[in-house]
Amino acid sequence: MNNETHTDLNRRRFVGTATALAAGIAMSGQSARAGASEGELQKSKLKLPPMHKGRKPEVAMLLYPGVTLLDLVGPQAVLSPSCNVHVVWKNTDLMETDSGLIMKATSTLGECPKDLDVLFVPGGEFSVMMDPEVLEFLADRGSRARYVTSVCGGSIVLGAAGLLQGYEATSHWSARDALSLFGATPVEARVVRDRNRISGGGVTAGIDFGLVLLAELLGEDVAKLSQLALEYDPAPPFDAGTPAKAGPEIMGRMKEWLGPAGEMLMPMCAAAAKNMGKYTPLVK
Amino acid sequence: MNNETHTDLNRRRFVGTATALAAGIAMSGQSARAGASEGELQKSKLKLPPMHKGRKPEVAMLLYPGVTLLDLVGPQAVLSPSCNVHVVWKNTDLMETDSGLIMKATSTLGECPKDLDVLFVPGGEFSVMMDPEVLEFLADRGSRARYVTSVCGGSIVLGAAGLLQGYEATSHWSARDALSLFGATPVEARVVRDRNRISGGGVTAGIDFGLVLLAELLGEDVAKLSQLALEYDPAPPFDAGTPAKAGPEIMGRMKEWLGPAGEMLMPMCAAAAKNMGKYTPLVK
């Protein structure tokens, strides 16, 4: 993309905002409601221009029922102005995410580009790691993608597809150890890179992960620009973000909150690991 | 909620996971596709139990076309296990968010509880601050809500509804100064509290904001539990999250990226401020 095109994009964005302003001023209660007729997609008037000149990397992010929405939206917010982000699932029907918000994929697994710059899997409801259609898709795209990536429990799903054998990786603190069942080496870190595998820790690690990935794809300046746009200058009011920092009392309440479900992950992963060779040849 | 009920919830969650596991093991490629028939809502099998015993606070989060999705999903992830979160808009039709993801509200403005613990507005496409139906809703619910809150450009929308007159507040760094047009005092901080108004800075500040709010609603231990569940132990790979930290070179690129749209906000706010008295009585 040359300078002119970049300026054109900014101009279009300006025009979009000016139109939005005019529309807003002209909008009566009646006309506002008229835009809300049943079933009509309500469009966003503002389009974010890319933060760089040149080709946009092709990124596929897996969406699925019960996905941890913030696992996906964190890196998606970091990457989306500068990448073609395809949010993919078997279909484009509506689905419930972990916390009840309703989403839909932007394209199906079949429509997803065959050759990706980035394949990304977020965490969530773990039964996706037993789904042959998903695992076949991941093993196929992962075999050619420039980067094979995940946040939170997404690394468990990559593991089940056989894509982390012989690699270091991380996951949510509660799931990290299970990576070894898939032939991976669990590492306790916010973001772990081993050759072209990049994985982030639990949920909010997706923002740190996204910035690491964006710098890798398009350089540090673009990553810093994205960090500034998202005002990512974190200041947590408490220091309880890891089991060690939270301490035994909060960890006790956490175990109570997780309940018996917390102990189901290892047997699920062991069952999933038995099928691993079906999708990606096992490392000898 | 007593101990028994809390245990029941955990048990239901366990059963949910066990069912999901069984379903995953039994799922063939064929049956997986069968679940994807046109138009059917694909449910999440996992339900997060609350992190406390007792009443769940009622939280309304405004959704709108062009919303900055991470502004909403950050605090929603922090609050959702422990609060009744209503994601509200004029209708429950599909809408595009800032970065192209498709969402829908869980209830309409009319269905939203009249008496809220928390009214929350995220940032995004600014023409919403000129929409009488939205401003009337905010002024009404905001007049009775225990907490009136925002992240990023959401404070501008609260301002347009007349809800920040005489209060200190913050916003995204690029929009903060505009708060003064609505009679608010802009403060440069990650999270600003003034009596029952709590506002967060740009986009990612929503996570810090969410934890401050959750501690206020349900105590520090619940907030710490949420922080641990989200593994919020941030480690940004760069230090460019504010204009001062990003430095002049990145700020130069930022201005180029924003283009003329960056200069549209002040006139838009000045126009919106003229209507402010319609919704909430002006402070003398």
Image: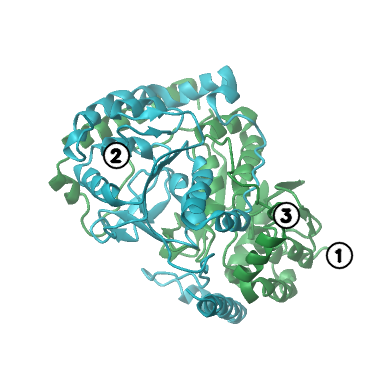
Chain colours: A cyan, B green
Q: Secondary structure at mark 3?
A: loop
Res B170 label: 3
The image quarter in which residue B185 lies:
bottom right
A76 or B46, which is in the foreground?
A: A76
Tell me if A213 is positioned left or right of A141 in this view: right
Q: Secondary structure at mark 1?
A: loop
Label 1: chain? Answer: B
Is residue A136 placed above or below B62 in the rendered structure?
above
Crowd class of label 3 (few under 14; some 14 to 19; many from 20; radius 10 Å):
many
Q: Secondary structure at mark 2?
A: loop
Res B284 label: 1
Residue topped by disc 2: A163
Is residue B155 placed above or below A23 in the rendered structure?
above
Crowd class of label 2 (few under 14; some 14 to 19; many from 20; radius 10 Å):
many
B30 or B282, which is in the foreground?
A: B30
Q: Nearer the viewer, mark 2 or mark 1?
A: 2
Tell me if A48 is positioned left or right of A156 in this view: right
